Image (cartoon, rainbow, N blue to C red):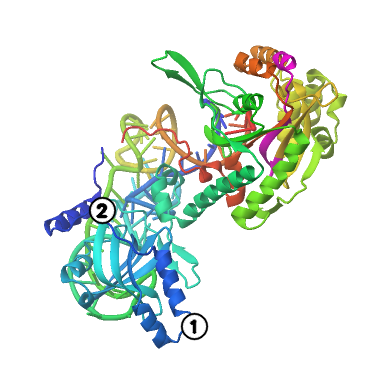
Amino acid sequence: MWQPNKLEQERLDKAERLRERGVALYPRRVQRSHTLGDAIQAAEAATDGLDDEAAEAALAAISVTVTGRIRRLNVKGGVSFMHIEDESGRLQLFLRRNDMPAEQYAIVKEKLVEVDDFVQASGHMMRTRAGELSVKVSEFLLLAKAVSPLPVIKQQVNEDGSVVEFGEFTDVETRYRQRYADLAVNRTVRDVFRKRSLTLRAMREFMDNEGFLEVETPILQPIYGGAAARPFTTHHNQLGEDLFLRISFELYLKRLLVGGLDAVYEIGRDFRNEGVSWKHNPEFTMMEFYKAYIDYHGVMDITERMFAYIAERVTGSPIITFQGQEIDMSPPWRRMTIREAVKEVLGIDYMDYPDAESLAVMMQEKFDAKLKPGEPWGRLVVEHLLGDYVEKELIQPTFITEYPRDVSPFAKDAGDDVHVERFEFFIAGMEMGNAFTELNDPLIQQQRFEFMAALYREGDDDETPLDEDYLRAMRYGMPPNGGFGMGVDRLVMLLTDQRTIRDVLLFPHMRQQGAE
RNA sequence: GGCUCCGUAGCUCAACUGGCAGAGCAGUUGACUCUUAAUCAAUUGGUUGUAGGUUCGAGUCCUACCGGAGUCACCA
């Protein structure tokens, strides 16, 4: 239960004083003729190239009604200044006692209206003596009273639009738990999420232009699958059945290929009941696509073009800077097999160790690897050789191809006994996504399911369930196709130069706090 | 889940080997009809995350718990 602190109590007292004067604290109607950005633009357009005197007259001819939140307030006496801010920008209001109704100036002078409140002001444009574009206010109205003060950051907005901040609001826990306050106060945070939105838009543009159809498939699933991860479980009361939150879209999207939708994609939330880290959140945004009549080479082509396109749209260039490193998304990206990559970085050929035992022994002897007993061969290669030693070296975009079959149940064989046509791609030392030439042989798919089930039954994890309906769909005939999945949040991290996934999620998962 | 570090006013931070809990910002009061991190004068503000313990005395030392950060494990 909320108890007002001292600052809040003072604001509540002011609210009461306003109410006694008949001032509405949260009026029903609002007017706005210009966003602040529009007002600034109109003023600049009207005065372009004019001398001072002509400019003054031109500004005086522009009449605006603007709205926004008070971010700076300077009450001087018979004249007061405030900066108000809306999403489009920030503009000064110039309030003079003689220019406006007495009772309206009085609530400013008596500081009954204060920083963080939302207000509406009407008047003509002007420049102050110091040259700052302002609205000379003739009508002033409170739109919404802020009871709790936002964290204090003083800002100086330079003429070129750059902002110097004095003081800061950096407490990460409070910033994530009260993202609204973080957004209200830290404009760079707003910029990150605008870029996130732009990233999603650019991704959709690209996929739509490539002829893909955007679809939506179930989040609540009776059988989860398509990836190796622990699911969240939930329950449908009326139907009396347990359900899982999806861990991937894979199996539903490929059913659509059976149904004659030849190129589909989905952007949505996946849920994995695993640990939380700088690149893991329990729910995260995934993009998967499947396209008939291409293989994983075709998927690589689409991938590198898509990343270059999105980077260009979001940052203006295919070359981005992430944590001080320049990264060039332009095609073509480097392509190498996992075997070549491991050979290059570690100088060993894992094919010399054809079974899990010999490979594990070698890795422990040579690299002092910390391995759990009983890890399958493919996982030693992918999780440990690649994941522990090679991954962090892959700064520029790189496709790593030809994965071990025993950890890739949905990919077609690569023509030898142990590898499949699969790639993962890496940027800035981070795994960004995963793709295959999709297996479309229903009988082999059934064997792979059974193999995976056996693998996990003897291991520590819960077994992967066998999806009979998916196999039935496949038996109707599935066109050869290439499939792709990527972590969208990680792409946003790259494009916004953010070090943790929490900084690109509006509301990252936080442990619940005790009753407050 | 393991280990390490952190939690002091609304925000950002101080407080020596245990010895009167402080500053800047903002807030409050007053002055000011072109300020802009406005200025000037005065001033309020704390269960030091919670609960115990050691001690003449705890923000500081010990234990447990809550929350966070980093790291390892698991995973994408």
- Reading the chain from its start, which is encountered first: label 1 or label 2? 2
The residue where tag 1 is placed is A49
Within the magenta stretch, is there residue A148?
Answer: no
The chain ID associated with circle 2 is A
- The type of residue carrying mark 2 is Leu
Query: In this picture, is A103 found above or below A351?
Result: below
Camera-side residue: A285 or B5?
A285
Q: CA distance from mark 1 to mark 2?
A: 48 Å
Q: Position of residue A23 (x, y in %)?
A: 17, 58
In the displayed orientation, state which residue is furthest to the front.
Answer: A260
Q: Secondary structure at mark 2?
A: helix
Labels 1 and 2 touching (C-beta < 8 A)? no
Query: Is A421 situated left or right of A497 in this image?
Result: right
Question: Percent position (x, y) of residue B45?
Answer: 25, 52
- The residue at the point 60 percent across, 42 percent down is A490
Q: Amino acid at mark 1?
A: Gly
Give the class, few, some or many, for how many residues have Cα within 10 Å of label 2's Cα (few <14, many ≥20): few
Residue A7 tag number: 2
Q: Which residues are magenta?
A: A426-447
Q: Is residue A155 visible?
A: no
